[in-house]
Amino acid sequence: MRSRKPIVVYRERYLPISETFIYEQIKHLQDYRPLVLCKEMLPEAKNHFPYKDVYFLKNIKNKAVVLRRRGIRLIYARFGMGGVDMLPFKRAARLPMLTSFHGSDVSRQLFKRSDYREALPTLFSEGERFTAVCEYMKNKLIDLGCPPDKITIIKSGIDLKKFPFHPKNSVDPYNIRILSVGRLTEKKGMDDLILAFTRVAVSYPGAKLIIIGDGEERAMLESRIWSLGLERKVELLGKQNHDRVQQEMQQCDMFVLASKKASDGNEEGIPNVIMEAMATGRLVVATRHAGIPELVKDGKTGYLVGENDPIQLGATLIKAIENQKNWPELIEKGRALVQAEHDVQKQIKKLESVIDDVIRATPKQVIKRQRTRSTRKVRRKRRV
């Protein structure tokens, strides 16, 4: 078995169920062996994301020395906040750092945490490279001051073996089963989706809407479901494990996600669950939000509607149900796009290529910094 070079992967909390994409990367790295550092281990992580090399940051004394002794080649910080957290260790251990950005770290967190926002220029200056999950996110980073030549797009990937292609090319519209998956939080737009579904329920009384996820909006959504008389047509299944999500994906006829920019500025990247639905062979209806249009191309790989528009969303759902002749082509192209751009194996190769580049370039940069420091010392002596 070939030797794998050790790197540190840092995530403050290991690991929310919604971050399967991080776990997939950790598992599938081929040339590098990740040692995961975190501040907190979430209860669900043991069952959903088992990994033996997870260490608590607070338990490691003389962190810089330990990193060097373990032969660590690079720090891979997940989310911008993780990059800021790791800056002191990067400096102390004299290691290069790659930082990934995903969504909230270029939106909500900028307004929520002034210390984080103020630290970004330093991160962009000292960090060797940065990744974004889509073009939309890359442009946001550039607007924040990140040098464009330091950014590489590494798209979130899924393990296609877990999502065999079983297309639903036609369904009984009077018993259609629509699925949505996401946290019950403002940016997921579940309130808009429930309102949109009222139109479907009027035209097709046997239709059902299944929502997987939990969050702070649950009580409000339950109240809305009852007020609209949809208690027998809309099911809130709460937080479910990945196996249950896959099971519901196989049983549904159509997938919908009504993402929107939240009042606190929070935005998506490209939700992995859309990739999973398209890979499975489900027609997708989604919103023109953040990076979603880079995957769901209106009339080509699915249907798109504007954000915050439940009327248009309801009309588009009806249009999709009534035009099933278009489903086979949309579904085939959707699967093909996921295979081409969101296969975890392909994205891992791209990621490892970036890590290779950063590690190869680092010695030259270190030498350059040392020479600069030496030159400064000589100049100071001459002045004296």
Image: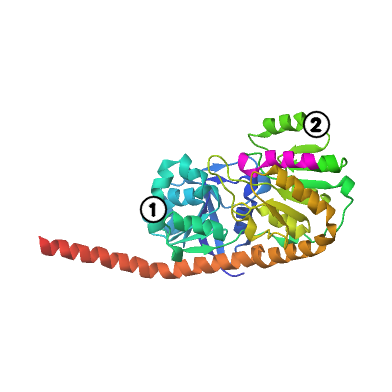
Query: Does the residue at mark 1 contact the one at mark 2 (Cβ under 8 Å)?
Result: no
- Label 1 packing within 10 angstroms: few (<14), some (14-19), many (20+): some
Instruction: For residue 121, say whether it is visible.
Output: yes
Which element type, helix, strand or loop, lies under badge 2? loop
Residue type indicated by callout 1 = Pro
Residue at 69 percent of width and 65 percent of height:
337
> Residue 190 lies in magenta, yes or no?
yes
Q: CA distance from mark 1 to mark 2?
A: 51 Å
> Residue 23 placed where, x, y %?
62, 54
Above-or-below relation of 41 to 221: below
- Residue at which label 2 appears: 229
Task: Indicate the quadrant containing the C terminus: top left, top right, bottom left or bottom right.
Answer: bottom left
Task: Place residue 202 in its image quadrant.
Answer: top right
Residue at 39 percent of width and 50 percent of height:
88
Could you say which disc has been placed on residue 79 in the image? none
Comparing marks 1 and 2, which lies closer to the viewer? 2
Characterize the magenta stretch by its predominant secondary structure. Answer: helix
Which element type, helix, strand or loop, lies under badge 1? helix
> Residue 306 placed where, x, y %?
65, 49
Residue at 27 percent of width and 68 percent of height:
371
Of the residues under marks 1 and 2, which one precedes in the sequence? 1
Tell whether 3 sits left or right of 60: right
The residue nearer to you, when weighing 107 against 164, is 107
Magenta-colored span? 186-199
Residue type indicated by callout 2 = Gly
Residue at 77 percent of width and 62 percent of height:
330
- Residue at which label 1 appears: 121
